Amino acid sequence: MNTYQYLWRLIMNRPVLYMVNALAWTAIYLAPIAPGLVTKQFFDILSGASGLSYGVWGIIALLLGATLARMMLIVFGFITDVHTRFRMGMMLRRNLLEHVLKQPGARAIPVSPGEAISHFRDDVDQSEEAASWSVDVFGMTCFAAVSSYILIRIDAQMTLLVFLPLVLVVTAAQLATARLMSELLDSVFSNSVNLGTGLILLLAGQKMRAGTFTVGDFALFVYYLTFVTQFNSNVGKFMTYFKQMSVALDRLTFLLQGAPAKMLTIVKPLYLKKRAAGLALANTEEQAVDSADHQTEPWEEAAPQPARIDALERLEVKQLSYRFPDTGRGIENVNFNLARGSFTVVTGAIGSGKTTLVRALLGLLPKTSGDVLWNGRPVEDLGEFFVPPRSAYTAQVPRLYSDTLRNNILLGQAETDDCLRRAIHTAVMEDDVAYLPRGLDSVIGPRGVKLSGGQAQRTAAARMLVRSAELYVFDDLSSALDVETEQKLWERLFKQRGDATCLVVSHRKAALHRADHVIVMKDGRIEAVGSAEQLLQSNRTFQELWYGDELRTVES
Ligand SMILES: Nc1ncnc2c1ncn2[C@@H]1O[C@H](COP(=O)(O)OP(=O)(O)OP(=O)(O)O)[C@@H](O)[C@H]1O
């Protein structure tokens, strides 16, 4: 999709609303034609070049009426413009977000979250801006056409001088490279218009002396020139915005990671609340889209019933592989089974593939090959399947938000019974909550900066434990915990988990001791499987990890 097609598809998002907006702004830009002609008449009357047809008060009343009418048009134009822009921007953000949310969680965006947010904000704004200015350019072109027709009829030579700067502007904007900033273009525009004004003054003086040009004509030229100035700089602005829109399109397409750019502009319902006032037309369009795709708004539907799930008896992972496209590293042909109620620890040296394994299993990374079977049935879409109440997951790096501790843990889930208190207790957070100035209602700062590393990890654990799940997956939960706290955490978890199944990435003895099975990873493959006792006898990697941990404990 090139930039023209992108602009066209944005416009076709709400074609009727766009047309209403274009008509409103065309009327606004054409509005000065009438007061220009009235002004000419006024000065011609004063200088005696024309007879008195309306009277001076009549002319003043006409000017006031034209100004009032233009003001009302401008108010209407702003309303239509806001509606048009808002819907374009919402459509882009909605479609982009839908795409991102459907991607495997760990590869949802190809850039950092901060960069993605700025693409969502700035690139969408740039696109909206260019689309919105296309309306102004159309309106101003209509003004240029009508005014030049009137001016040519008065004096063709002078008209050329008025419109000469326009030609310069369009050429300058066309030649402008990415490095030529819009400020520089602006200065080119205003100076070329000043030049034009000077030339008109020089020529008008001569012609007025020769009697071929009236004071009214002069007033009309100067009056229209003001609007031609606007036209010049706005055409230039549109061209600059259009170029920026092309960059914005590239960035937004990059976020789609290979998906077709057309999906950005697919028209889908926005679920905007219907307004009592506002544009009847816009409402009609909204309703048309709504009735085509959806009969009711999501919040008007009955609350979704919790998914009926098939309790986990046995999870089988067969030949699971994933390779990172850039490094070629990852996991290769991983096979293991988890029985209901078992506690399995995945261990291995740094970079051996533990995180990649759990992420590929949960569909957070798109598996290259292999199968996952839940009670013997293959799971089609791992990312959609492995969510509460089937499974809950704590990532190695907790993702916390600038909100209260309570909201960070609940993450939108309703606070029922004493689930929150139990989750906090299992995650060994009760003392931290007691010491925080406002307890669970303390705001923890951007990314949870007000919490220590251990507190942040336990908050993430509480977030997972507050959800009841058949399968709990912990990725190196204890890396920022002291040995004593970690010991407590596993003890409490063992007491409270019932027959939930646990898959834990860890190299710590507190977890390894409790494991029914330990899986040792090396270079992306399973090197050995067994109990900690068996592996201590037979596996060198495991021995190194075990004694290395002991050494670290002694040193600390
Ligand atoms: N985002 C990534 N892009 C490319 N390669 C990656 C990426 N993440 C991990 N890898 C590579 O994949 C391999 C497995 O990494 P992984 O993070 O799964 O190891 P790990 O055993 O979990 O390590 P750690 O103990 O540090 O968490 C490593 O060689 C690593 O360099």
Image (spheres, grey):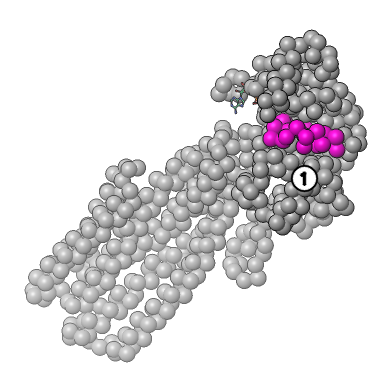
- Magenta-drawn stretch contains 483: yes
- Range drawn in magenta: 472-492
Q: Is residue 291 left or right of residue 136?
A: right
Rendered residue at 36%/54% (across/down): 237
From the top left corner, tell me how far across and down residue 62 is, in percent: 36, 83
Kindly tell me whether residue 350 is visible in this rendering.
yes
Judged by its main secondary structure, the magenta piece is helix
Residue 295, image quadrant: bottom right
- Magenta-drawn stretch contains 503: no
Residue at numbered disc 1: 429
User: Badge 1 local density, few (<14 within 10 Å), some, or many (20+)?
Assistant: many
Image quadrant containing the C terminus: top right
From the top left corner, tell me how far across and down residue 194 is, in percent: 21, 62
From the top left corner, tell me how far across and down residue 444 is, in percent: 66, 51
Number of numbered discs on residues:
1
Rendered-image quarter of ligand 1: top right
Kindly tell me whether residue 521 is visible in this rendering.
no
Rendered residue at 61%/49% (across/down): 446
- Tag 1's secondary structure? loop
From the top left corner, tell me how far across and down residue 541 is, in percent: 71, 14
Give the vertical position of 143 relative to 398 (above or below).
below
Instruction: Out of 498 and 61, give the one closest to the viewer.
Output: 498
Q: Is residue 128 left or right of residue 465?
A: left
- Type of residue at label 1? Met
Rendered residue at 27%/56% (across/down): 187
Q: Is residue 356 left or right of residue 531?
A: left
Give the vertical position of 375 relative to 400 (above or below).
above
Rendered residue at 33%/76% (across/down): 35
Q: Is residue 442 left or right of residue 93?
A: right
Instruction: Out of 263 and 141, give the one closest to the viewer.
Output: 263
Give the vertical position of 533 relative to 171 (above or below).
above
Residue 336, image quadrant: top right
